[in-house]
């Protein structure tokens, strides 16, 4: 539970006089961390955040699900520090790579793991490969495509297979160094783009003498912070800020629409379950009308922004998604903090339906084997029923013959007497 109290907020119209109003806003979340002072007893370290969130990401990927973890908040609130960290205090992305390498090192002969990595940024609504290398001074922007089954992807994005933790960290540092940053009125090296670090978690296993491959995807997203346009900066900074705000506004619209659709779906299910207990044609007609109204869901504008298009599956599709909302303790950031918490509250209402990403042919073979086993059990039970029925029929025939012999004996005795 996060509570915000408005006291002493500066208002420009009052010439620096503090605002005497007090407001309390309550928001409920799964975890709440405070990282203002490392010497404080309630200080949340990077290790604590990883144990709560990073372990969930790795466990979901090991089970075969797509997982997305993205940080949202204003500029300078700690998004990049939480996701990437510093050399002295590494963030979630290096820790996830480290534990993934431990799994790769400890794997057995019948369970092989492969970790291709990719790193991209979205700058001015264009996709750039951060791991392309120095052979291209001005690489051309990449195009976003959409597969009918796998969802959106970036055409031509380079993937790098790593064999140890050092290679993964080197690639991560190379991508961070190639990321576009600039000085703003809030931060000296503010991120001017959205960065997506992807780990493709591929598991090749042998189950019941049948080769199987499960491919899950981990998206670690570091969003650029929203901020107001400052006319003192150059035209490039204003253009960057406009594109950042456009993508974040679209992200907010998508999150709100997805949350509304999830609430409509849950409410329609509860109404149908209540009305199904009633009797009569009137109740049936009300149930059909209410269920029909519940099916009219909001349109999700994924393609209005490159960011929401790439995160389509992560936001409302086949993925387990975790959102980190970072806020600033400063009273001057009250409006941005409230907007961030509202973002997170809406995102918490979204309900995804992830599934295990296994090979379709292997899944079909397994389902056919299960069907064969079920038919065999049905056939066996039918044969046992026939055998029991035959025994019962023979018993009745034998009893009928004994009855005939008994009556014939009685008649013979009667005639003799």
Image (spheres, rainbow, N blue to C red):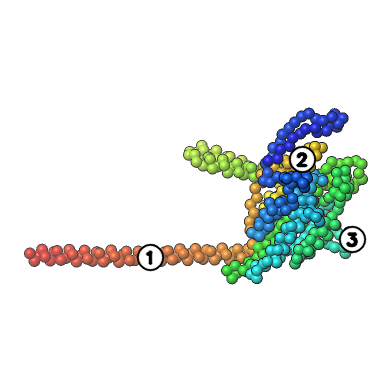
Q: Marks 3 and 2, Cα distance to the nearest angstrom?
A: 38 Å
Which element is circle 1 on? helix
Q: Looking at the rendering, in which quadrant would you find the C terminus?
A: bottom left
Residue at which label 1 appears: 386
Q: Please tell me which residue lies in front, 204 or 26.
A: 26
Q: Is residue 24 visible?
A: yes
Point out which mark residue 36 bears: none
Q: Please tell me which residue lies in front, 81 or 40.
A: 40
Kindly indicate whether the residue at mark 1 contacts the one at mark 2 (C-beta within 8 angstroms).
no
For image coordinates 71% across by 38% down, the residue present is 3
Determine whether 88 is above or below 346 in the image: below
Quarter of the view holding residue 368: bottom right
For image coordinates 87% across by 30% down, the residue present is 15
Q: Marks 1 and 3, Cα distance to the nearest angstrom?
A: 80 Å
Q: Earlier in the sequence, mark 3 or mark 2?
A: 3
Residue 347 pos. (x, y %): 70, 45
Determine whether 145 is above or below 267 in the image: below
Q: Marks 2 and 1, Cα distance to the nearest angstrom?
A: 73 Å
Q: Please tell me which residue lies in front, 317 or 177.
A: 177
Structural crowding at the residue carrying mark 1, measured as other residues with C-alpha within 10 Å and reported as few (<14), some (14–19) or many (≥20): few
Residue 58 pos. (x, y %): 68, 57
For image coordinates 78% across by 45% down, the residue present is 37
Image position of 172 (left or right of 205) = right
Residue 11 pos. (x, y %): 83, 32
Residue at which label 2 appears: 337
* Residue furthest left in the image: 417
Residue at which label 3 appears: 137
Residue 248 pos. (x, y %): 78, 45
For image coordinates 15% across by 66% down, the residue present is 409
Image position of 209 (left or right of 120) = left
Quarter of the view holding residue 403: bottom left
Kindly indicate whether the residue at mark 3 contacts the one at mark 1 (C-beta within 8 angstroms).
no
């Amino acid at each position: 539970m996060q509570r915000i109290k408005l006291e002493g907020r500066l208002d420009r119209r009052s010439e620096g006089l503090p605002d005497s109003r007090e407001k309390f806003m309550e928001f409920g979340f799964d975890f709440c961390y405070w990282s203002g002072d490392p010497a404080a007893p309630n200080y949340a370290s990077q290790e604590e955040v990883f144990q709560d969130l990073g372990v969930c990401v790795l466990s979901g990927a090991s089970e075969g699900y797509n997982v997305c973890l993205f940080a949202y908040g204003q500029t300078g609130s700690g998004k990049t520090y939480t996701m990437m960290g510093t050399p002295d205090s590494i963030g979630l992305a290096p820790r996830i790579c480290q534990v993934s390498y431990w799994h790769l090192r400890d794997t057995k002969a019948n369970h092989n793991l492969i970790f291709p990595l990719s790193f991209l940024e979205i700058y001015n609504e264009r996709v750039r490969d951060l791991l392309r290398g120095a052979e291209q001074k001005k690489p051309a922007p990449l195009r976003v495509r959409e597969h009918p089954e796998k969802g959106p992807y970036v055409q031509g994005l380079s993937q790098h297979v790593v064999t140890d933790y050092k290679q993964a960290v080197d690639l991560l540092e190379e991508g961070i160094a190639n990321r576009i940053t600039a000085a703003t009125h809030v931060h000296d090296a503010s991120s001017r783009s959205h960065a997506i670090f992807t780990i493709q978690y591929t598991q090749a296993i042998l189950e019941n003498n049948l080769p199987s491959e499960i491919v899950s995807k981990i998206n670690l997203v570091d969003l650029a912070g929203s901020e107001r346009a400052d006319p003192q900066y150059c035209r490039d900074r204003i253009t960057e800020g406009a594109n950042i705000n456009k993508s974040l506004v679209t992200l907010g619209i998508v999150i709100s629409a997805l949350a509304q659709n999830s609430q409509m779906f849950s409410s329609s299910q509860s109404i149908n379950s209540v009305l199904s207990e009633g009797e009569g044609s009137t109740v049936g007609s009300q149930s059909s009308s209410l269920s029909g109204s519940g099916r009219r869901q909001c349109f999700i504008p994924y393609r209005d922004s490159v960011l929401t298009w790439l995160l389509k599956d992560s936001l409302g599709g086949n993925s387990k998604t975790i959102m980190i909302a970072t806020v600033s303790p400063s009273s001057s950031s009250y409006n941005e903090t409230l907007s961030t918490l509202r973002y997170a509250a809406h995102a918490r209402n979204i309900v995804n339906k992830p599934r295990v990403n296994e090979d379709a042919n292997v899944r079909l073979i397994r389902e056919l084997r299960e069907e064969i086993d079920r038919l065999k059990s049905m056939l066996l039970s039918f044969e046992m029923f026939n055998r029991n029925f035959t025994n019962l029929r023979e018993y009745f025939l034998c009893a009928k013959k004994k009855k005939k012999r008994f009556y014939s004996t009685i008649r013979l005795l009667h005639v003799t007497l």
